[in-house]
Amino acid sequence: MAVADLEHLRIDDPSIDDERAARFWLIIKDLDTVLHKEGHPVERKVVSGTKTLHPLLPNLVFPIDNKYTGMFFGLRDFGPHQEKCFKDVFRRVVTIARAVAPQSYVGEGWNSCTTKVLDNAIIGYCLSEGPEAIIESIESFAKQRGREDLLEPGRTADLTKWVREELRDTELPPQS
């Protein structure tokens, strides 16, 4: 399947199903757009692949990131189960798109296409939920990394130190 064959599709298109999601994954998996410093392609293709295809297929490919998309769907990163995570997130975004008709919100600036409208809504939701969403995300992150011990009462300082070390190079949104 060539990218040009997909230009007519939108994220809320009734023909989008699990079979098409599997075919989209094959395209994403084969993209080598981001390289390690050593020159070999990154193995985790969900983020780099969707962000590469989004400008080419803006009404079809939802730009997935670890920070907000991950938080919204309860994932810290897409790790070793990329295909399963991609298909699950894609299916869920398709369901949301069909329910809210994002095309009706497309306009100027940040709401330039259907998938960007959905992306902005997810980012806005994550930011508006504030501390509770952040706490849940930190707890989930600690559990995924096998650090449940840091969630025990009295370990807040240790948890904070550990999270800062783990996220040292991660750009966080400004606090308001």
Image (cartoon, grey):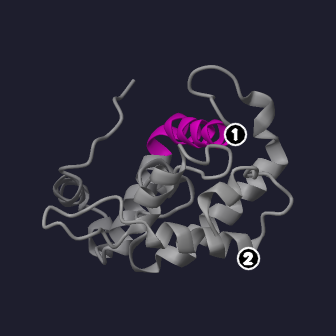
| Residue 6 is covered by the magenta coloring | no
Left or right: where 65 falls relative to 92: left
Evaluate whether residue 73 shows in this view.
yes
SS at circle 1: helix
At x 53%, y 49%, the residue is 63
Question: Would you call the spot at circle 1 few (<14 residues within 10 Å), some (14-19), or many (20 or more)?
Answer: many
Identity, as a three-letter code, of the amino acid under mark 1? Thr
- Looking at the rendering, the stretch of residues picked out in magenta corresponds to 115-132
| Residue 123 is covered by the magenta coloring | yes
Label 1 to label 2: alpha-carbon separation: 21 Å
Secondary structure, magenta segment, majority class = helix
At x 63%, y 19%, the residue is 108
Which of the two residues, 114 or 40, is positioned nearer the viewer here?
A: 40
Tell me where residue 94 appears, x and y as whole percent. 73, 57
Which of the two residues, 87 or 142, is positioned nearer the viewer here?
A: 87
**Residue 16: quarter of image:** bottom right
- Identify the residue at the far top of this view: 108
Could you tell which of marks 1 and 2 lies nearer the N-terminus? 2
Identity, as a three-letter code, of the amino acid under mark 2? Glu
Tell me where residue 65 appears, x and y as whole percent. 45, 52
Circle 2 is placed at which residue position?
19
At x 19%, y 49%, the residue is 169
Which of the two residues, 70 or 140, is positioned nearer the viewer here?
A: 70
At x 48%, y 48%, the residue is 68
Tell me where residue 132 appears, x and y as whole percent. 49, 46
Q: Where 68 sits versus 86, above or below?
A: above
